[in-house]
Image (cartoon, grey):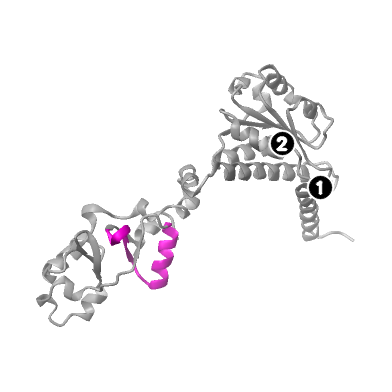
C-alpha cells in the first residue's frame, strides 16, 4: 500500500523521536566535563562541520551566543584558506561529523593539535579519526536516518542539534544567565518585547500629571489636559495617595469646579512596580479595563506612569 504524506511524516517524526529518547538515556559520559571546559575558557566556542553538519554548527553557535556563551561558526573550507586565524588558544572547538571521517575538518584538527586548543568531537563513531584526535567525545547513539534510503542526514543532524541545545541550556543555567541578560541579547522583535520591564517604557519626571489634595479642580483639569493621559496622580510628599480618572470626573460632576483634587480622587489606585514585566502589566490593564497604571517604588513613592499605548508600541500585544 502506498503511504500518504501524513504517514511518511509520522514515520519520520517517530524515528527521530526514538533516537532522541535513546540519546537522553545514553548521554555521553563526557558531557559534564565538556560543560565544565566551556565554562572555563577565556575565549569563544568555535563550532564547525561540513555540509548539513555545517548548518547545524551555525545553529549551535547562534544558540550558544544568544544564551551567554560567546560562540562563532567557522566553515572548514574557509578555515583552510585563512580563517584558522580566527581560532585562538583561548578558544575551544566543537567539530561535528557523523562519520568522524570528514576530510574537510583535517586542517582544523591539525590547528587545534598544533596550538593545544581543546577540541570536542560530536560523532557517531567512537573509533573515528575525529574522535581519536579529540580531547572529549560526545558520541551520538547508532540510530537510522529517517529518509527512505537511510542515507540523507536527518536523524543524525537532529541529534546533533539537540545536543547543542542541551549544551547551551546547561551552560546558561550554570552561568546564571537570567531574563535581564537574555533581553540584552534579544532587544528586537516579539521575544525582546516579552522580556521588557515597565521601567523601560514608563513616563517619568515632568511628564507625570501630578497634583496635590488641595489643588483646585480647575487647575487639575488643566494638568490632565496638558499631560494627555486622561488621569491625574494625587501626590503628597512624593507618595501616591490617589488618582483622578475620567470616571471620577463623571461621578463628581455636581459642583465639580468648586472642589479640590482630594475631594474627587479615588484613594486606592491600582499600581505596578518598575521591575514588573511589561507583558504582566498589560495583562492587568486588560483584565481591569484600564488604560493607565501608576508606577510606584517602596513606600508608595510615585516614579512613573504606564499607558497601554506604551506597551503596544513596545511590541507587547
> Residue at position x 74%, y 27% from top?
134
Query: Where 287 falls versus 274 (above or below)?
Result: below
Q: Nearer the viewer, residue 59 or 65?
A: 65
Q: Quadrant of residue 104?
A: top right
The magenta stretch is 277-301
For mark 2, does the 10 Å Cα neighbourhood hold few (<14), some (14 to 19), or many (20 or more) residues? many
Residue identifier under label 2: 53
| Residue picked out by circle 1 | 147
Q: Secondary structure at mark 1?
A: loop
Q: Is residue 80 above or below residue 239?
A: above
Q: Who's the residue at 33% across and 61% down the image?
A: 307
Badge 2 element: helix
Is 125 covered by the magenta stretch?
A: no
Circle number at residue 268:
none
What residue is rendered at 76% in x and 39% in y?
29
Find out whether residue 291 is within the magenta segment.
yes
Residue 204: percent from the left, percent from the top?
Answer: 27, 54
Nearest to the observer: residue 264 or residue 1:
264
Left or right of 208: which side holds 218? left
In the rendered view of the protein, which quadrant contains the C terminus? bottom left
Marks 2, 1: nearer the viewer:
2
Which of 19/301 is in front?
301
The residue positioned farthest toward the top in the image shown:
114
Quadrant of the rendering where the N terminus is positioned: bottom right
Query: Would residue 294 be found to the left or right of residue 94 on screen?
Result: left
Is residue 8 rendered to the left or right of residue 274? right
Give the x, y percent position of residue 78: 64, 24
Q: Residue furthest left?
A: 258
Q: Give the mark, 2 or 1, whose residue is nearer the N terminus.
A: 2
Count of picture labels: 2
Amino acid at each position: 500500500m502506498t503511504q500518504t504524506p501524513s504517514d511518511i511524516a509520522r514515520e519520520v517524526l517517530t524515528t527521530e523521536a526514538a533516537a532522541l529518547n535513546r540519546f537522553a538515556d545514553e548521554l555521553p559520559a563526557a558531557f559534564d566535563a565538556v560543560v565544565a571546559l566551556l565554562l572555563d575558557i577565556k575565549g569563544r566556542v568555535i563550532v564547525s562541520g561540513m555540509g548539513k553538519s555545517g548548518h547545524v554548527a551555525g545553529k549551535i553557535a547562534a544558540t550558544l551566543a544568544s544564551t551567554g556563551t560567546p560562540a562563532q561558526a567557522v566553515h572548514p573550507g574557509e578555515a583552510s584558506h585563512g580563517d584558522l586565524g580566527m581560532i585562538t588558544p583561548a578558544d575551544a572547538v566543537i567539530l561535528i561529523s557523523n562519520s568522524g571521517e570528514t576530510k574537510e575538518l583535517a586542517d582544523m584538527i591539525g590547528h587545534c593539535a598544533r596550538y593545544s586548543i581543546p577540541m570536542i568531537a560530536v560523532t557517531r563513531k567512537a573509533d573515528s579519526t575525529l574522535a581519536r584526535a579529540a580531547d572529549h567525545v560526545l558520541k551520538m547513539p547508532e540510530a537510522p536516518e529517517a529518509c527512505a534510503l537511510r542515507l540523507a542526514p536527518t536523524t543524525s543532524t537532529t541529534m546533533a542539534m539537540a545536543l547543542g541545545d542541551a549544551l547551551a541550556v546547561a551552560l546558561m543555567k550554570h552561568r546564571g544567565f537570567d531574563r535581564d541578560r537574555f533581553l540584552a541579547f534579544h532587544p528586537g522583535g516579539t521575544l525582546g518585547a516579552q522580556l521588557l520591564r515597565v521601567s523601560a517604557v514608563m513616563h517619568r519626571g515632568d511628564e507625570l500629571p501630578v497634583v496635590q489634595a488641595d489643588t483646585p479642580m480647575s487647575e487639575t483639569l488643566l494638568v490632565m489636559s496638558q499631560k494627555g493621559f486622561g488621569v491625574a496622580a494625587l501626590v503628597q510628599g512624593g507618595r501616591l495617595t490617589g488618582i483622578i480618572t475620567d470616571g471620577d470626573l463623571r461621578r463628581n460632576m455636581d459642583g465639580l469646579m468648586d472642589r479640590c483634587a482630594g475631594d474627587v480622587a479615588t484613594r486606592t489606585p491600582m499600581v505596578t512596580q518598575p521591575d514588573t514585566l511589561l507583558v504582566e502589566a498589560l495583562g492587568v490593564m486588560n483584565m481591569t479595563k484600564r488604560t493607565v497604571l501608576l508606577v510606584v517604588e517602596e513606600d508608595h513613592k510615585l516614579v512613573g506612569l504606564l499607558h497601554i499605548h506604551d506597551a503596544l508600541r513596545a511590541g507587547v500585544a
